Amino acid sequence: QAQLVESGGGLVQPGGSLRLSCAASGNIFRINNMGWYRQFPGKQRELVAAITRGGITNYADSLKGRFTISRDNAKRTVYLQMNSLKPEDTAVYYCNANFFDGVRPAYDAWGQGTQVTVSS
């Protein structure tokens, strides 16, 4: 099984920036789509952004222009650059990826989540 480990969360003032990273490890033949989701207290997890292996991106409409997703296939890492952060961006951010190990059907995995708090 592959694992995902996120880093880069923390406390930032409104208007500030953070860059989240998520590194994959384990028995991996290929990583297909990768993405970031966030979850507010008492709410369901929602898509922030996703990126295909070839670099095609998809964003939640409300976040276009402020957040940028990217990936480094050689490093098996996906990034989320978050700019002009607002208090309403405060949430737990989760990394997600679709893995193929070369034998079994592809499957999704999640990171443990990283807290992002936007507050003065």
Image: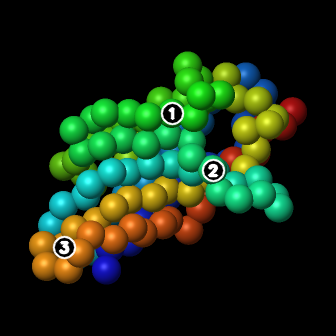
Spatial separation of the CA atoms under disc 3 and disc 1: 27 Å
Q: Where is residue 43 in the image (x, y as percent from the top left)?
A: 77, 57
Spatial separation of the CA atoms under disc 3 and disc 2: 27 Å
Q: Position of residue 117 (x, y in %)?
A: 76, 45
Image quarter in which the N terminus is found: bottom left
Please name the amino acid that badge 2 sits on: Glu
Q: Classify 80 as above or below 6.
A: above
Q: Earlier in the sequence, mark 1 or mark 2?
A: 2
Question: What residue sits right under mark 2 in the picture?
Answer: 46
Q: Earlier in the sequence, mark 3 or mark 2?
A: 2
Q: Which residue is located at x 47 percent, y 30 percent?
A: 68
| Other-residue count near label 3 (Cα within 10 Å), few / some / many at <14 / 14–19 / ≥20 | some
- Viewer-proximal residue, 111 or 47? 47
Q: Which of marks 3 and 1 is nearer the N terminus?
A: 1
Question: On the picture, is 74 further left or further right than 42?
Answer: left
Question: What residue sits right under mark 3 in the picture?
Answer: 101
Please name the amino acid that badge 1 sits on: Tyr
Q: Position of residue 69 (x, y in %)?
A: 43, 36
| Other-residue count near label 1 (Cα within 10 Å), few / some / many at <14 / 14–19 / ≥20 | some
What secondary structure is found at the residue carrying circle 2? strand
Q: Which residue is located at x 44 percent, y 49 percent?
A: 35
Assess whether mark 2 and mark 3 are in contact (beta carbons under 8 angstroms).
Answer: no
Question: What residue sits right under mark 1 in the picture?
Answer: 59
What secondary structure is found at the residue carrying circle 3? loop
Q: Which residue is located at x 67 percent, y 22 percent?
A: 84
Q: Name the quadrant containing residue 52.
A: top left
